[in-house]
Amino acid sequence: MEPAKKRIGKIIQILREEYPASRTALWFETPLQILVATILAAQCTDERVNKITPFLFEKYPTVEDLARARQEELENIIRPTGFFRNKAKSIIAAAKKIVGDYGGRVPDRMEDLITIPGVARKTANIVLSSGYKKAEGIAVDTHVRRLAGRLGLSRQTEPDKIEKDLMTLVPKKDWLDFNYMLVNHGRKVCQARKPRCPECSLRSLCPEARTYYPGLKLAPKKGASTG
């Protein structure tokens, strides 16, 4: 198998062909909403978060409203997302920080975002890429972590170290979409329990394909699709 540097261009090309409209599955309209939705999505499905956020954002339409929210009341709304006490605490603290230090506007720089309670690099990258269309890094969630390892793009296990490897490999022009393309591929084909390598358009570029399917022909059929 060729080194990752020689494979990454083809991997990105195929992912763009397979997932041309990649974006976050979280519903949002503003940077504040994608920030809150991403906090809620920790260890929770996007679908479940999307069922809650329309009501949540109607009840608390501004960052000032969230900063004044009663902890117990917010907990009751977001309870289905799990870890609701910590998430409610983080959301209220984040809103207060944004009001107090950033004039009520969600900042659009990585160094500022990571000062906000509940926001680490993954969340900050999602806010920047989805909320501001800015690429300062690559968000590493469970899907990206899994696929980066299987595709041989990183041998690291810590998200920040995986991100550094990916930022070295992936051209910056592709940073905005790379997380979302891997997430889509991880959900559809390269699933956690067992990847669907025989259907995968990346199998000829994946060091792990024959590990899961010994004897698998790596070259995809002409016109093959993950569909």
Image (cartoon, rainbow, N blue to C red):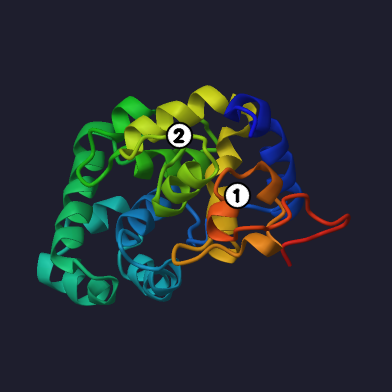
Which of the 4 image quadrants contains residue 165?
Answer: top left
- Residue at x 42%, y 71% (from the top left corner): 54
Comparing 178 with 3, the one in front is 3
The image quadrant of residue 65 is: bottom left
Q: In the depicted view, which residue is nearer to us: 59 or 204?
A: 204
Residue 148, image x, y percentages: 49, 42
Residue 23 in sight here: no
Question: Of 49 and 106, which appears nearest the observer?
Answer: 49
- Image coordinates for residue 137, horizontal then vertical, percent: 46, 31
For the C terminus, give its image quadrant.
Answer: bottom right
Residue 11 at what x, y percent from top left? 67, 40
N-terminal label among 1 and 2 = 2
Q: Could you say where residue 4 lies in the image, as x and y percent from the top left?
A: 59, 30
Distance of label 1 from label 2 (alpha carbons): 17 Å
Question: SS class of the residue under badge 1?
Answer: helix
Residue indicated by mark 2: 154
Question: Does residue 59 lie above or below 210 as drawn?
Answer: below
Q: Nearer the viewer, mark 1 or mark 2?
A: 2
Q: Residue at x 27, y 77 (%)?
A: 80
Using a 10 Å C-alpha cutoff, classify the residue at mark 2 as few (fewer than 14 neighbours), some (14 to 19) or many (20 or more).
many
Q: Residue at x 67, y 50 (%)?
A: 203
Task: Tell me if residue 92 can be seen.
Answer: yes
Q: Which residue is mark 1?
A: 181
Give me the residue at 29% from left, 35% from top: 103
Extreme front residue here? 215
Q: Is residue 152 above or below residue 21?
A: above
Q: Would you say 59 lies left or right of 128 here?
A: left
Where disc 2 sits, the SS reads loop
Position of 141 with respect to 100 (left or right) is right
Q: Residue furthest right?
A: 222
Which amino acid type is shown beneath numbered disc 1? Met
Q: Amino acid at mark 2?
A: Ser
